[in-house]
Amino acid sequence: MAVELKQTFDMVQILNEEGEINPDQEVPELSDEELKDFYRWMLRIRIFDQRAVKLNRQGRLGFYAPMAGQEACQIGSIAALRRDDWLFPSYRDMGASMYHGLPLHQVFLYSRGQIGGGTIPEGVSMFPPQIIIAAQVLHAAGAGWGFQLREEDKVAMAMFGDGATSQGDFHEGLNFAAVMNARSIFFCQNNQYAISVPLSKQMKSKTIAQKAVAYDIHGVRVDGNDILAVYREVKEAAERARRGEGPTLIEAVTYRQGTHTMAGDDPSRYRKKQEEEEWRKRDPLKRFRKFLESKGLWSDQEEEQTEQEMLEEINEGIKKVEAMPKGAVVDVFEDVYTEMTPDLKEQKEEFLRWKGETK
Amino acid sequence: MAVMTMIKAIQDGMRVEMERDDSVLVLGEDVGVNGGVFRATEGLYQQFGEKRVFDTPLAESGIIGTSVALAALGFRPVAEIQFQGFVYETMDQICSQAARLRFRSGGRFNVPLVIRSPFGGGVRTPEMHSDSLEALFLHTPGLKVVIPSTPYDAKGLLISAIRDPDPVLYFEPMRLYRSVKQEVPEEAYTVPIGKARIVKEGKDVTLVAFGAMVPMAEKAAQQAEEERGISAEIIDLRTINPLDMDTLLGSVEKTGRVVIIHEAVKTGGVGAELMARINEKAILHLEAPVVRVTGYDTPYPISSLEDDWLPSVERIRAAIDQVLDF
């Protein structure tokens, strides 16, 4: 399906920073319960993020990439998909992953480098979090191509950041998906920084969304702190893809409020406090809560209750993984191939012998 | 039985598997309408159509990256990298993605992906088309690496590769594509991955080779046998990863003298790994140091120099003398 070549990609916003619906916009068709669930989930992963940062500082968690500020992207995007759609997340997309079915304690296992951290449970339709920037763009293109081939009523969504748009795999992925008419969504969270490098040094393009034009696919620029807009655009992209009308690139404009990861990143080296404060005014939770409150759908009591429930879940989760085995080197030989090779069998035996002798 | 070249046997291997299993796809640059630059996929597009055989965009990482997900979600892609020298373009998707997905996901996902690629010298290609890069993938856990030297093995190994639940790199010696003909069954059959072939038995020296070096080893062995009245054992590795050490060590224990031949550069090659393992497992059986006949540690040279750069029958012959006369 041919796409009109546009010169500009205006940012789609339904809910403004004050928590009001913009005059020319409508709230997507969602029940009150669904709207509340959006907020509940955003709050859940905000609490998760705050606790994960603390647990990391206490040495109880390891690798962790904070996602505070990006909750509308995390929840709005995945909430627009079905449980049998496939997610190809990056390491920062633990919010979306948990919404899609990844158990909370598994995020902790992954963070702590414990055995089973990458084991995606049967029935959860996602790949393990991707570390190599933009590699998952090709996986979403391939999966979406497969759905198109089999005329399966499913979509594949890759989640990645603004830095990923400089990688070859991003461009190859968009091109493959376009040519193969893949049932794919490329959801870019433009959080303004790739570690320390601002978007202005990443690209000369005015927007990320406009890159869709080069591949003749749908391109959308959306306010990534407005969960209603994110949800609507992903929903429309998914419906197009399911109908076999091709892939969509979505640029969700947002901001990483925290550090890149918890491994010593100091944002004060590359961005100003004032900028951080300005973005905090656009916080995705704040405006959506205001909106819900204006409709009488949310109360302090519900806020507190959700917080308490989440804190309990987190406490249970961390206790659970701390009581679980770290894993043993003997286990790693098993998963390399479907059947262990003679070399691996020999090395496993060698390892066991060595452990036995040095005990 | 039909008499086939290696290229025909490869084509036939894909055809019988595509007939047997709808999930087998063929994709790559020029593999569709054109049947591949070497005609390895000739007729497949016409027989199986545009939903099974794909001319992809010209992007190696794209070919393998999309194949990883296709494979993990139920297809059996047979992806072609047009020349092995182009494989660097997709190293991440092969070595970090395809090779590790099973491991990273705790066994949730398998990647039954075959990556076919022509390789090796002696056919006067432009630069960067003739490298032998198999050792890179011997060094990568999670991959299997297969290299046939005969039409029969080519078809049987390819069918095994397609049926294998894990990623298999299937490297095709360009020089042997049309130079050897052999009787090949028309039906599907398998040659096991991980099993070397004893080309001929002998008792005085073991020659270890694979791909296009196998016929050269045979010639050198024949000369040495005629000139010196010795008998040489020749092993065609057929699989580079995992290595068939049982067959190799059995031969080393018998002959005590070993010459390893490969086209790839000398340092860090398959030969180095074999020597290390012989050292670990059979050093007391050796009557002479193991000798390697290989390419030199330079980038693959311009085509007018390649005959002198590549291992030759003469160099192998000299190496046989070296281990016999030690």
Image (spheres, rainbow, N blue to C red):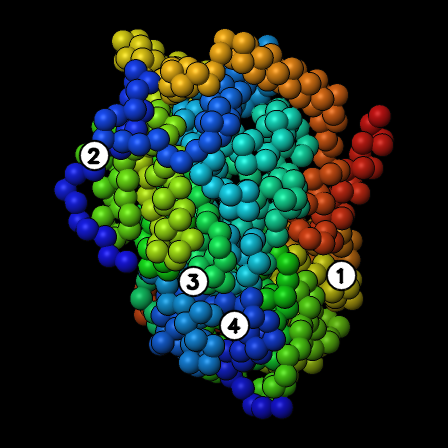
Q: Which sits earlier in the primary sequence, circle 4 or circle 3? A: 3
Residue with the mark numbered 1: B246
Most extreme residue toward the front, as rendered? A296
- Chain of the residue that carries numbered disc 3 in the rendered image: B
Residue where numbered disc 2 is placed: A10
Residue A40 position, x and y percent, is 51, 22
Quadrant in which residue A357 is drawn: top right
Chain that bears disc 4:
B
Q: Are the numbered discs 1 and 3 placed on the same chain, yes or no? A: yes
The residue located at (31%, 66%) in the rendering is B126
Q: Is residue A68 visible?
A: yes
Circle 4: residue type: Ala
Q: CA distance from mark 2 to mark 1?
A: 66 Å
**Residues packed near mark 4 inside 10 Å, few (<14), some (14 to 19) or many (20 plus):** many
Asked whether the residues under marks 4 and 3 belong to the same chain, the reply is: yes
Front one among B290 and B129: B129
Does B221 sit left or right of B265 as displayed? right
Nearer to us of marks 1 and 3 is 3
Residue most toward the bottom?
B2
Which residue lies at the image location 43% right of the left edge and 62% below the top edge? B81
Give the left or right position of residue A346, taking residue A16 as reference.
right
Q: Mark 4 = which residue?
A: B212
Badge 2: chain ID: A
Q: CA distance from mark 2 to mark 4?
A: 59 Å
Q: Which residue is at 69% across, 39% downward? A: A332
CA–CA distance in space, label 4 to label 1 = 23 Å
Residue bearing the label numbered 3 = B81
